[in-house]
């Protein structure tokens, strides 16, 4: 390479981790799907009519009226300071007894996960994830040069006995034990399943036995449409090993970009130091003002009713339209249904045909660390209307039937 060529190519200045991962991540590549004009079953976005535009405008007006310029200063005003109290109240409503000293505010859930990574992960550490899992978390973990291993799931969530067996083998062989286990216990992304309370208790036992932390990501937990909520892992954990992440993106709007971590006070002190200034002060005040007088609780009830209708329409349409041999999860909440197609169907290969037919989804392979999930797809019922969902499932069923016919012809 000439001196001039070298001066135009500065990629050698990237960190070693960036150079190793810069061509491997699919996170972000899927975003081009949204420009297709097809029914959007790929997106884990709230439906547009769910946004409380007028109420947020009213909350902002009253915030300025009460606090004036203080609302726009770096630290914000009294409403910004009060947001941790709101989070503590929400946590107590869900069975967790915590204080504001155990709350760290972040710029969304992804920033919260990244803050935990910065605090605890060194290159070469081992992180265990569910298989499949949220592709954004996989991208973050790869940024830290860690070894990512996975454990299978079933209809009751993470297969805890498979995890126990894996940990025992590691210990016996003298292999590295994990420093962190990442789980989405409620309405899992992408499968929609919920980890049972019995497995949550067993997971804590394993964390103590093998000395690792549990990172519990819970963006969908308040959006429950059926059944009773198991106690959060954090509520069951008396050892302090569970770090809980949450966000207002699903209960207010993604654009507010405010999340939080619930963890031991000693952890929070380090999060505060490492991620100082990581959350917008004006948005903190706006959220607190908006949530006053139970308004957020009522909004969550209305959201849940809207999402329930969409989930029900998707499950009904899948039952009515999908060809034999197709199976899917039936979530009690959240945004997602996880589909497994019949033999011979490759979801990633089929995607372009599905878009032409009029529907988008995310192939299952996006959610694994290994080359698997080819017969799976994640469908989101959160963004499209019930009528669009029905239209999209009809298009998907037609695409699957065409793919099955093509596979049979090839045989």
Image (tube, rainbow, N blue to C red):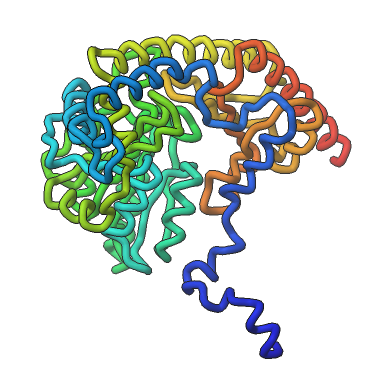
| Most distant residue in the right direction | 409
* Left or right, residue 7 beside residue 248: right
Between 374 and 61, the residue placed more toward the observer is 61
Q: Residue at x 43, y 18 (%)?
A: 52
Name the side, left or right, on which 235 lies relative to 37.
Answer: left
State which quadrant residue 4 falls in.
bottom right
Residue 208 visible in the picture: no
Quadrant position of the N terminus in the picture? bottom right
Q: Residue at x 33, y 41 (%)?
A: 280
Q: Quadrant of residue 303?
A: top left
**Number of marks in picture:** 0
- Which of these two is toward me, 310 or 111? 111
Q: Position of residue 25 (x, y in %)?
A: 57, 55
**How far across and how far down the image is residue 247, in percent?**
35, 34
199 lies above or below 179: above
Residue placed most toward the observer, 152 or 253: 253
> Is residue 227 positioned above or below 195 on the image?
above
The structure residue drawn at horizontal position 30% and vertical position 27%, both measured from the top left corner, is 64
Query: At 51% across and 52% down in the image, what residue appears?
Result: 369
**Residue 162, above or below 311:** below
Q: Quadrant of residue 107?
A: top left
Look at the image and tell me whether residue 129 can be seen: yes
Q: Quadrant of the C terminus?
A: top right
Q: Position of residue 293 (x, y in %)?
A: 23, 13
Question: Can you give x and y, in whole percent of width and height, for residue 384 in the image?
Answer: 60, 20
Q: Nearer the viewer, residue 231 or 81?
A: 81
Residue 333, placed above or below residue 105: above
């Amino acid at each position: 390479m000439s001196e001039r060529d070298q001066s135009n190519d500065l990629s050698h200045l990237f960190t070693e981790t960036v150079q190793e991962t810069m061509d491997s991540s699919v996170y972000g590549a899927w975003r081009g799907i949204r420009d297709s004009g097809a029914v959007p079953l790929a997106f884990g976005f709230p439906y547009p009519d769910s946004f409380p535009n007028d109420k947020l405008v009213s909350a902002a007006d009253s915030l300025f009226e009460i606090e004036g310029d203080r609302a726009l200063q770096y630290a914000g005003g009294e409403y910004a300071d009060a947001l941790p109290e709101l989070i503590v109240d929400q946590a107590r409503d869900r069975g967790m007894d915590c204080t504001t000293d155990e709350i760290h505010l972040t710029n969304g859930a992804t920033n919260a996960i990244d803050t935990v990574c910065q605090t605890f992960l060194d290159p070469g550490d081992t992180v265990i994830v569910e298989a499949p899992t949220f592709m954004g978390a996989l991208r973050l973990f790869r940024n830290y040069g860690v070894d990512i291993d996975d454990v299978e799931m079933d209809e009751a969530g993470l297969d805890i006995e498979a995890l126990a067996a894996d940990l025992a083998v590691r210990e016996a062989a003298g292999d590295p034990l994990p420093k962190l286990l990442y789980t989405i216990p409620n309405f899992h992304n992408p499968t929609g399943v919920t980890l049972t309370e019995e497995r949550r208790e067993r997971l804590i036992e394993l964390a103590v036995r093998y000395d690792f932390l549990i990172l519990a990501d819970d963006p969908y937990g308040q959006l429950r449409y059926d059944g009773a909520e198991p106690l959060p892992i954090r509520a069951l954990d008396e050892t302090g090993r569970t770090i809980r992440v949450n966000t207002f993106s699903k209960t207010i709007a993604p654009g507010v970009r405010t999340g939080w971590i619930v963890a031991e006070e000693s952890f929070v002190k380090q999060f505060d130091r490492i991620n100082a200034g990581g959350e917008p002060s004006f948005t903190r005040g706006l959220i607190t003002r908006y949530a006053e007088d139970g308004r957020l609780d009522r909004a969550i009830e209305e959201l849940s009713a809207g999402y329930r209708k969409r989930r029900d329409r998707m499950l009904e349409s899948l039952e009515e339209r999908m060809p034999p041999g197709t199976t899917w999860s039936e979530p009690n909440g959240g945004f997602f249904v996880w589909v497994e197609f019949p033999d011979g169907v490759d979801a990633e290969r089929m995607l372009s045909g599905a878009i032409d037919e009029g529907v988008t989804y995310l192939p299952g392979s996006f959610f694994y660390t290994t080359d698997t999930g080819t017969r799976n797809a994640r469908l989101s019922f959160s963004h499209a209307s019930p009528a669009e969902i029905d239209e999209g499932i009809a298009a998907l069923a037609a695409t699957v039937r065409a793919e099955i016919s093509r596979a049979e012809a090839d045989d």
